[in-house]
Image (tube, grey):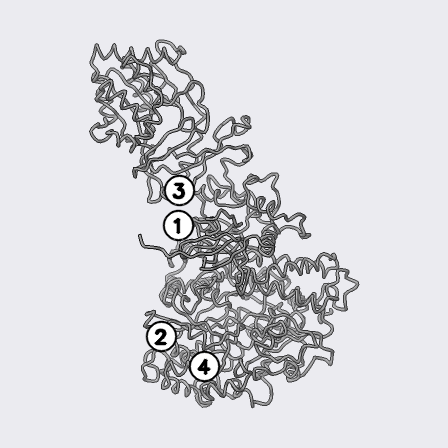
Amino acid sequence: MSEKKMVSLTIDGKPVSVPEGTLVIEAARALGIKIPHYCYHRGLGNPGNCRICACEFEGAPKPIQMSCRTIAAEGMKVRTSSPNARRYQASSLEFHLENHPLDCPVCDQSGECKLQDYYMQYGLYGSEVREDKLHKGKRIPIGPHVMLDQERCILCTRCTRFTDNVTKTHELGIFGRGHQERVELAPGRSLDNAYSGNVVDICPVGALTDRDFRFRVRVWYLDETESICPGCARGCSIDVHTNTKRPWHNEGRRVARLKPRENPEVNGFWICDEGRYGYKNLDERRLGRVMRLKPRPEDLSWSSALDEVARGIKEASAAKGTEGLVVVASGMLSNEDWSSFKELFVKTLKIGRFLFGPEPDQIGAEDDFLRRKEKVPNLRGGLDLGFGKEIKSLSWDDLAKSIESGKTWGLYVVERDPAKVWGSERAKALLDKLDFMAFQSPFKGEAGEWARYRLPATAYVEEEGHFTNFEGKVQKYGKALEPLGSARPDWQIFDDLRARFLSEEGSSGRREKAGALA
Amino acid sequence: MSSGSPVFSAEEEKTLKAWTTRFPHPNMGLIEALRQVQEWRRHIGTAEESRLAEMFGLPLGRVHEVATFFPFFTQKPTGRRRIGVCRGLSCELAGTNKAVRALGEKLGVGPGETTPDGEWSFEEMECLGACEMAPAAIVNEELVGAATEETARRIVAEPGKDFRPQTVIGPESTEHRLLTGRFGEPGLETLDGYRRAGGYEILKKAVEMGPAKIMEEVKKSNLRGLGGAGFPTGMKWGTVPPKEKMPGPRYVVVNSDESEPGCFKDRVLIENCPHGLIEGLLIASLAIGAEESFIFIRGEYKRQHHILEKALAEAEKAGLMGKNILGKDFSCAIKLTRGAGAYISGLDTALLETMEGKKAWPRQPPPFPTTHGLMNRPTVVNNVETLMMLPPLLRIGGEAFAKMGTAKCGGTAVFSISGHVERPGVYEFPMGTPLRRMIEAAGGIKGGRKLKAVIPGGASTPVLTAAEIDVAMDFDSLRGVGSFLGAGGIMVLDETVNMAFVARNIERFLAHESCGQCTPCREGSEWTVRILDRLIEGEGCPEDVVNLDRTGENIAGKVICALGDTVGSVTRAMMKKFPEDFKSEAGERSSGAGKQPAGTAA
């Protein structure tokens, strides 16, 4: 790496050294000094049109300069909150609010709106505007996910820069000019690109809101947990926003929304819509009860269920041989899960036949930006433990044939639904031939109904763990919610089951070990 | 579109496609292509935008942005003839409202409407650059003359007829008229006529001198940019990186986007002496090593565009343009390109954006155009008059030129004088001539009334009181009294005028022309107009004056470009100097009160 020359300056009296070419607003950020800004965004550039990041530059011929347009220079003395600087920050805010409808009580952005935040910080009490507000379009659905309110828009151009420069899909533009100007769709277009939801995140005001999230729950009731998107092999950093303080809101869903979390090495500032809106099933069709379904449904305790499962496997293996048991899994497993999975099935039970390849039910659209075709987060974690190298994956066709021929007598299915591949009828016919089937998953799934044992696993938001993305980057996701019902992490189920084969208690402290391993 | 029928005929396609190859970059032809479509279809629909987008390889939204930014383009069909009446300050003082009323009666439709037969549409327009014939009227981009009540009716009744009065060019003594001295000589606008007057002789001399010596003379001359900024021309040229340091093309662009209320001298210069501009442009191109140069002319100057087209064709035929000019090792092609009705296009970086087929949002230097200009190449943007000064400057020499003016401001300047004077017109004076003498030369105050105020450099320059007119008219002296020379658009206001009306007129212009890029200007200009509207309608309150002052101060200097600075300073200067005109209660205001601007009492 080439040595970058450093320049030293002082901001609000604090000295700081930054690489040559750094913007003053960034130099301030390095010191933890937040300068208000709308148009500037690290992922979208610095057009300098909102004029609110004004700072005072001591000794400059024109002392008030925009900190997002000024490059830090040696010896510069910047004041971000001198009376003069604050005055222009406040006056710029006043211009932004001049035609703003001030409809905060009914605006979904309330609580995370930069107009509100800066208003409170810069203390502009009492409007001097006696004129009627200009009227523009309201509640315009501009795509499947985004609602536009032109009156709330402050024309910072972040959204148009996103569609012009990031997705390069050019759906949005700023049309007209002067105070008649408005953000709008280009004629005949719809904001339906695979990343459209990001415009909601970058909109600093309530002009672009999420059609999925709006009016569900006020943002100040939400909790945030750092996580990793499980939607594909990219492993974008996200924040899971959960609503547990107002459980009767949001149709009872605990996860209110997912937001991208900045990660320059993986996803920058963005996530795709597929990932963003992939959370909705997290509270739907969930498994919460540990059950034996055949011959008739009955609730079991974890301990008796695992005893029965272990006994079932032991007995059938003794009678028909271990090679008749196939384990179906997928890249939905965390590194902790994979590790326990391997301990149980490979090392302890010596199972030789697995199905974990993503085809065809976990394959989807790919592009040259973020989306990967493998729609599971952690195939790589499995690969690093040999799944896909020395341990090969069967295909669904192989599996069907071996069930039909009677070669396979049992299936242990983890976080996957054979009915999705084979179709309901064929799946039922095939699975009915089996002597043994365990179905372990956070979700019911169609094939789960035909299993002998149904074991509820936690969803990724209910556990802590690690995913390894397709490039080999190991990333941690946090626990945002308590498990539903009796659900347990997959690794714990595997460990407890393994104990039954080793005749010792399920291990503890497994997670730490696996995390380190990963 | 889906119907399968092509949007344009084969012939039309050919014409439009030609614009994609005419300039160094295809996008540079976009605005001309849009103009063509507007002319054919009388509007630009989505189908047309889509086809153009394909043709130019641009996203549809980009084309739509341009089509909705420039007032020349409409989304709904206009009449076959578009008549516009100017509502710039000089025109409004002379009776825009009366003309609008007369036209409305004659056409049976109001401003912004089209006659049911689709023949006429009627608009109030911002400054048409013809303040001397106030109130000016335009039909399909060609100035047709003064829209007095009578001529307004005749313009409609006798379409195609030219009602323009002869423009006064002064002062009578040509002693100091370096540039305009020979204006009025028959045939000066033709190549032959220009040559008879010694034209293109200086170009020969310049080719002999070579770039370095030209540059030296220009630096010595203290020639300042006469488009408004007053930046020393030689110094600007000097910042163009030499070819050894930055190889590749460089351009000179003529800024003929004269659109500021009060300024019309560039129009008159082009009408009278197009070859003078071409010669000046060639000299500048030679000086900085440009082998391709451009004249960007405002869309409303259709007649002047034709004049230049003709002159360029003559020059090319005579070997004065193109390869090996005058048989020497100097080549320069000149191309014409037009705007589409936006004042902001006259600001250098916005002009370059317009030329590149984008909406005219000013750039924020650095880098400056002289290093990164048109298509990111080194570009000198010079005003019409600045370039036209080059032949006389080289004729008399830099030193003599400098001596004609003040210590830092060389030579002469051509002033546009309008408003309440007896003989509005174009007047050339040495830099530093007192304003009082200029007003006298223009016949003094109309009707023998008393002088109230003068806007010295065009609508965007802060007002002077009657007591301040002994100021010397040059860039530095005017700065000394808190105003600007601008582009020398002198607007004289007599005692009947109420300054709140003047402020509103100018602020309305600026709000209309604000490009919308930065917030203080976009929001502040419109707010200022609305406060002034209320004040003038007698619904003001004491806080209005405070807010106008505060708002103005918060805009000026905090915006991206000079237009925004102006929004902040124009009204403040008027309020400071004429506070009585901004009193909140209608009754307290002087005779100008009421909805009609002063001077237009119905």
Q: In this view, does B564 lie above or below A368?
A: below
Quote the CA–CA distance across marks 4 and 3: 55 Å
Q: Residues within 10 Å of mark 1 (few under 14, many from 20)?
A: few
Q: Residues within 10 Å of mark 3 (few under 14, many from 20)?
A: few
Q: Where residue B218 is drawn, which disc sits there? A: 4
Left/right placement of residue B145 relative to residue B294 reads right
* Residue B32 visible to the viewer: no
Nearer to the camera, B514 or A258: A258
Quote the CA–CA distance across marks 1 and 2: 35 Å
Report the mark closest to the observer, 4 or 2: 4
Write down the quadrant of residue B487 in the picture: bottom right
Callout 1 and callout 2 share a chain: no
- Disc 3: host chain: A
Q: In this view, does A20 lie above or below B149?
A: above
Question: What amino acid type should be assigned to the residue bearing mark 4?
Answer: Val
* Residue B344 visible to the viewer: yes
- Disc 2: host chain: B
Question: What amino acid type should be assigned to the residue bearing mark 3?
Answer: Asn
Q: How crowded is mark 2: few (under 14 residues within 10 Å), some or many (20 or more)?
A: some
The residue identified by callout 1 is: A168
Report the mark closest to the observer, 3 or 1: 3
The residue identified by callout 3 is: A263
